[in-house]
Image (cartoon, rainbow, N blue to C red):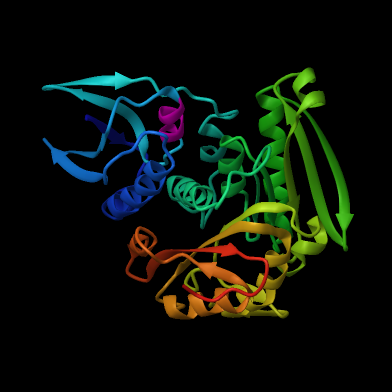
Amino acid sequence: MTTYRILPHPGVSAVFFDASESLSLAELTLCLRRLDTPCGAPRARTAQGVRWYLFDAEERLPERDTRRLKRLSSLYALFEEQGDLLRPVQTPRDALFGEDLSAILKYTGKTNALFTRLMLHIAELSLPAAPEGRLRMLDPMAGKGTALYEALMRGWDAAGIEIVRRAAHDAAVYFQKYLETEKWKHTLRKEKAYGAPVWRFAFGRDKEALKRDPGRLTMVAGDAGRADRYFGKEAFDMVAGDLPYGVAHGSVAGGSLSRGPAPLLDSCLPALHGALKAGGVLALSWNTLAYPAENMLQMLGKHGFACLREPPYDALRHRVDASIQRDIAVGVKGRGKASVK
């Protein structure tokens, strides 16, 4: 039996730190289930004011497993216990982009990047089967692109829809400038789809990569209710996004402003369901004080998603501030209408 310790990422904000323990343990639980090496349940421990996440493995982890652990949002460093000593474990970094891609851009209402990273990883770990080739992710409420950049950092192809045209434009301009500054080879096509402006990026570290197997980012300044029109049926392995919290800003649905997510969900979920592949995963974070969890589960079930609420999915609710209690709903698309589990 080998015990491992994870030193959490130092970028967790002070407000988010207390809530991050249950979230990180939930993410780690799902990750350990995917390892080749059998592992026990993870646990948290604080020693001399430092928080650690621990788990026991039946044997020393092979590189394939440590690579999987490296994808944890909470992981800053991994150690193996050897008596009273800790041996650092090399966790190979295989990401195309560094953390600066999502960290540089600052704007009002930006979701904590580590929370976004956690939500994307939980969605990935919830896929019933590994996708063939590079994973494709859609954020239907993309804002200025935090989730898109986090997806690119994970080596995925990313697409976003943002109804505020200026925000979509700013995201495209930012990404183009980033590629130019970092000297990435890239192309950009500007076009329209059903009247909505579209920016399509293809990029690679060099000319050969751009030609052979480019990464892709697409931003649409349009309506999430047309996702299946913009991208076609069954185009994505995953849909993930942060819904309006109904506090600082609203959402546009049916031509009017709403401070809650219900009208937005009812109008866009059919299109998101259509844009997802069978077996694809939908992950949405939202404010349960503005929209109760029971209502969210019923809404997703109504539109064909089987919601995952067994442990550890039932441990994702957490306080952000006095007016926001956030949760993550995870649903899997079946081939027909699904019932809520």
Q: Position of residue 127 (x, y in %)?
A: 55, 52
Q: Position of residue 87 (x, y in %)?
A: 24, 19
Q: Quadrant of the N terminus?
A: top left
Residue 261: within the magenta?
no
Left or right, 340 with reference to 28: right
Q: Position of residue 293 (x, y in %)?
A: 43, 75
Residue 65: within the magenta?
yes
Viewer-nearest residue: 35 or 102: 35
Whether residue 292 is visible to the viewer of this picture, yes or no, is: no
Question: How many numbered markers are drawn?
Answer: 0
Viewer-nearest residue: 205 or 104: 205
Q: Quadrant of residue 90?
A: top left
Left or right, 38 with reference to 341: left
Q: Main secondary structure of the magenta part?
A: helix
Whether residue 22 is visible to the viewer of this picture, yes or no, is: yes
- Residue occupying the point 62% across, 51% down: 144
Q: Is residue 203 above or below residue 262?
A: above
Q: Is residue 274 above or below residue 167?
A: below
Q: Position of residue 182 (x, y in %)?
A: 65, 24
- Residue occupying the point 26% across, 43% down: 40
> What range of the chain is rendered magenta?
64-70
- Residue occupying the point 30% across, 39% down: 39
Left or right, 285 with reference to 27: right
- Residue occupying the point 88% across, 55% down: 192
